[in-house]
Image: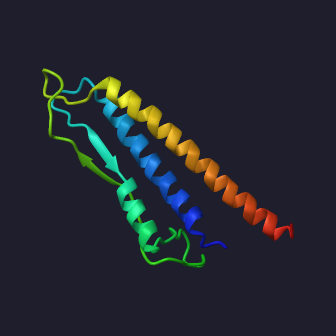
Amino acid sequence: MFSSTSLQAAMHGLDGAAARQNSISNNISNVDTPNYSREVTSFKDTLNQAVQNGNLEAHQTNDEHIAFGTQEVGPKTTKDTSSMYNHNGNNVDMDREMANMAQNQIYYNALADRAGGQFTKIKTALQGG
């Protein structure tokens, strides 16, 4: 029950969404920085592949925790150097970043609801319901 693929995917997705939020925040805070290249955090493709292969691994913060899975999946952040948006060499488009932030927040909330539902199922099972 604790190795539910749905719960693992939701937890990894939350980590990816948090990393993406950090990249978007960095982009917004550097909107006027000359020659700044925006950060892009990708995660969905990596997560989807790991889910399809059935080899997700939970992150262990303590060696005494129960281990399961075979592959730890994490977000990858890269610099987008493909375009120049501003006259100062900066390629951050504030409208695009704000739209990405809103989309990422919706994605994060959906995953948090899914993880909460999984924890409710575990709680119900432990209570004998």
Relative depth, front residue between 3 and 36: 3
Q: Where does the image place residue 88, in percent across and percent down from the top left?
A: 13, 23
Q: Is residue 37 above or below residue 34?
A: below
Residue placed furthest toward the right: 128
Relative depth, front residue between 34 and 126: 126
Q: Is residue 66 above or below residue 33?
A: below
Relative depth, front residue between 48 and 3: 48
Residue placed furthest toward the front: 52
Q: Image quarter for residue 40?
A: top left
Q: Where does the image place residue 8, in percent across and percent down from the top left?
A: 54, 64
Q: Is residue 23 above or below residue 8?
A: above
* For residue 79, side relative to residue 75 (left or right): left
* For residue 85, side relative to residue 75 (left or right): left
* For residue 31, side relative to residue 119 (left or right): left
Q: How many marks?
A: 0
Q: Where does the image place residue 65, in percent across and percent down from the top left?
A: 60, 76
Q: Residue at x 63, y 48 (%)?
A: 113
Q: Residue at x 21, y 42 (%)?
A: 80
Of the 4 image quadrants, the one containing the C terminus is bottom right
Of the 4 image quadrants, the one containing the N terminus is bottom right
* For residue 108, side relative to residue 2 (left or right): left
Q: Where does the image place residue 90, in percent across and percent down from the top left?
A: 18, 29
Q: Residue at x 49, y 59 (%)?
A: 12
